[in-house]
Image (spheres, grey):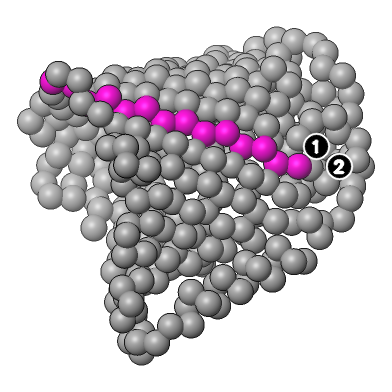
Amino acid sequence: MKKELLLASALIGSLGVAGVAEAASMTMSGHVRNGVVSTDKDDGTDESVSASRQTGFSLSLSETTDTGIEISTGVSIADEGGAETDESGIVLTFTGGEKLDLIEAGNSYAGHLASVPGASGEQGIGANSTNAAPTGLDYADSSDAVGFEFHTAADAFGVEGLKASVSANFNDDAAASTNSSSLENGFSVGVSYSTTAGDSTVSIGGGLVQASSTSMSTTKDAANSTAVAATVATGNLTVGAGYASGDQVSDSTTMSAVDLSSVSVTTFGAKYVQDDFTFAVGMTNGKATDVAIGNSSSGDADSYSYTGASVDYTVAAGVTATLGFADNESEDEGTALNTYGGSSWYIGANVSF
């Protein structure tokens, strides 16, 4: 409880400054994405063709106090076609460039990873829920709405190109459980560095996270992972790679929570920009061994693989046409899940503002 009171005090103290206007400034952003997806699964069923439509719309609010501290927040009204009202937390940006995120603050573990190129578009076949293999570097990104994240200013600690952040979340009032699992308390750090080497710009970033579980049966942490990613940009070409590993407990409030061990995921990608065209390729390979919570690791691993390629063409300002292709493979404890494997195509356009 003391942690929550300290957090509340920091929030009230930061906001309790004079000179804030009665109405904050507002900006809006969003997109509408329409296209067609063709899917040919490995299970022998007929190829299917379907429409793909996504919408995003959000509002950003901000104002600056007389002391120069910017206070910002926002709300998402639509996300990938689903109507929602998802409020952001509060971000305080100080005059020196440091930032403090309060309430639903995020996680430093994944926030500093270099952006590995990958295919754009809506193609791809999702993995089955019984497949515990990770599909991205941030698979262990765990946090509770009650928490904070502090970001250094650019060129942290006097090192040009260096940034860092630290985050923590507090849920120690959560009830203990046995075969179910929820996030309790968590802590993470992240660091990124960017520099030039000849004609190339090199960016590398990584982080680690450790979070406890409410389960009294598990021998694992809710999350205990490290991740790192790097990119090299030379002229119009960018290449990158990333890797993450670490055990965790799948977060579930039901009896279906499982312990995950030998978890790892690797990503590779490249993109090339020529005039209004962007050519991109990317691949992801993940694996994990899942067992009933509290049991020793055994059996074959689940696995997930994705290979994709795309061509984007900028038709006009804010309008991009995309042609994409993907190939998926999915295995549950060594057995191929053909319903969740196969190839797919996408053609569509994105209009953003």
Horizontal side of residue 63 vs 39, given as left or right:
left
Observer able to see residue 139: no
Q: Residue tagged by mark 2?
A: 215
Residue 332 drawn above or below residue 98: above
Q: How many marks?
A: 2
Magenta stretch: helix, strand or loop mostly: strand
Q: Secondary structure at mark 1?
A: loop
Q: Residue tagged by mark 1?
A: 257
Horizontal side of residue 75 vs 275, given as left or right:
right
Indicate yes or no whether the magenta region holds residue 326.
Answer: no
- Residue at (77, 66) in percent of width and height: 1
Q: The residue under label 1 is which amino acid type?
A: Ala
- Residue at (37, 43) in percent of width and height: 157
Q: Position of residue 234 (x, y in %)?
A: 17, 21
Name the quadrant of the C terminus: bottom left
Q: Position of residue 20 (x, y in %)?
A: 36, 84
Q: Secondary structure at mark 2?
A: loop
| Residue placed most toward the observer, 108 or 280 | 108
Point out the stretch of residues depicted in magenta: 199-212
- Residue at (82, 37) in percent of width and height: 256
Asked whether disc 2 touches disc 1, contact meaning CB atoms under 8 Å apart, the reply is yes
Please report whichever mark, 2 or 1, sits nearer to the chain's N-terminal start.
2
Horizontal side of residue 138 vs 179, given as left or right:
left
